[in-house]
Image (cartoon, helix red, strand yellow):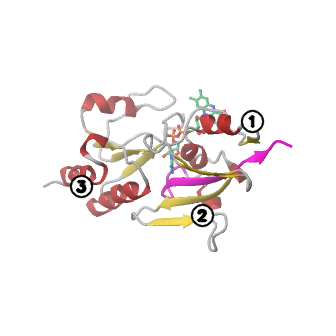
Amino acid sequence: MEAGADLIERVRLVCGTRHVLTDPVALLTYRSDGVRRDGPLPLAVALPGDGAEVAGVVSACADNQVPWVVRGAGTSRDGSALPTSAGLLIALTRMRRVLAIELADDEVTVQAGVPAATLARSLAPTHTLAIDYPGTVGGAAAAGMLGRHLVGLDLVQPDGTLVSCTPRSIGYDLSGAFGGSHGTRGIAVSLTLRAVPFS
Ligand SMILES: Cc1cc2nc3c(=O)[nH]c(=O)nc-3n(C[C@H](O)[C@H](O)[C@H](O)COP(=O)(O)OP(=O)(O)OC[C@H]3O[C@@H](n4cnc5c(N)ncnc54)[C@H](O)[C@@H]3O)c2cc1C
């Protein structure tokens, strides 16, 4: 079996068949970003539901030597969320769960596909995240827009291993190195943000 077909078969096992898009019509929407473009269609679009599924998809790509691009809401305008024709697009739009709200510590932990502006509005009665543009929390962090609001993350590295850097963990500050990486350091699957209280 060729690498592309083998990969798609494995990704279906990881995410479930209905969360792997291969129909060319379904793929059309993914060849544009915040700027309308007519770029190439990817081999397929994978829509994982959690960090373990993201790790499974990235491992499958590594084993089959197929490149991938990660995408949040696809609202950026620099082309970095666009697929390549020989690669898989990993879209995080199903990963929209708020995992923990700890306003006593001014922290909130969310899956990477949570819309940034929606989260900011939901915290607005008491706290600010200083984000008010389209896109996901993961996309905003990868584009370097969260600055010091980003204090921790779970990251799937390019070989498919999942590493964790929480606000209270000991070790490298992956969150600092992740900001502005545009997907090149791996895929953030959950992020912990510091929300600033209105005083
Ligand atoms: C109308 C409009 C207004 C905008 N206003 C602003 C503005 O005021 N300020 C501003 O800075 N930007 C603005 N933008 C640009 C864009 O909205 C932001 O860059 C947004 O944060 C991107 O989020 P996204 O989820 O759409 O990311 P995407 O466009 O999907 O991806 C952006 C980059 O991040 C990577 N990425 C996405 N998710 C992850 C993840 N979980 N882990 C690792 N890498 C990831 C992608 O590979 C890509 O390189 C605007 C865009 C539009 C269309």
Nearest to N terminus: mark 3 or mark 1: 3
Q: Find the distance from the CA under tag 3 to the CA under tag 2.
A: 29 Å
Secondary structure under badge 3? helix
Cβ of mark 2 under 8 Å from ligand 1: the answer is no
In the rendered structure, which segment of residues is drawn in magenta? 182-199
Q: Are marks 3 and 1 in contact (CB under 8 Å)?
A: no
Q: Does residue 135 appear left or right of residue 158 in this picture?
A: right
Q: Which residue is mark 2?
A: 174
Q: Amino acid at mark 2?
A: Leu
Q: Are marks 1 and 2 in contact (CB under 8 Å)?
A: no
Using a 10 Å C-alpha cutoff, classify the residue at mark 1 as few (fewer than 14 neighbours), some (14 to 19) or many (20 or more).
few
Q: Find the distance from the CA under tag 1 to the CA under tag 2.
A: 30 Å
Answer above or below: position of 33 versus 152.
above
**Where's residue 14, x and y in %?**
29, 54
Nearest to N terminus: mark 3 or mark 2: 3
Mark number displayed over residue 10 = 3
Cβ of mark 1 under 8 Å from ligand 1: the answer is no
Q: Amino acid at mark 3?
A: Arg
Mark number displayed over residue 125 = 1
Q: Does residue 78 appear left or right of residue 161 in this picture?
A: right
**Where's residue 17, x and y in %?**
24, 44
Residue at 25% in and 49% down:
12
**Where's residue 113, x and y in %?**
50, 43
Answer above or below: position of 109 versus 73.
below
Quarter of the view holding residue 170: bottom right
Q: Nearer the viewer, mark 3 or mark 1?
A: 1
Q: Nearer the viewer, residue 24 or 95?
A: 95
Q: Does residue 198 appear left or right of residue 83 in this picture?
A: right
Secondary structure under badge 2? helix
Nearest to N terminus: mark 1 or mark 2: 1
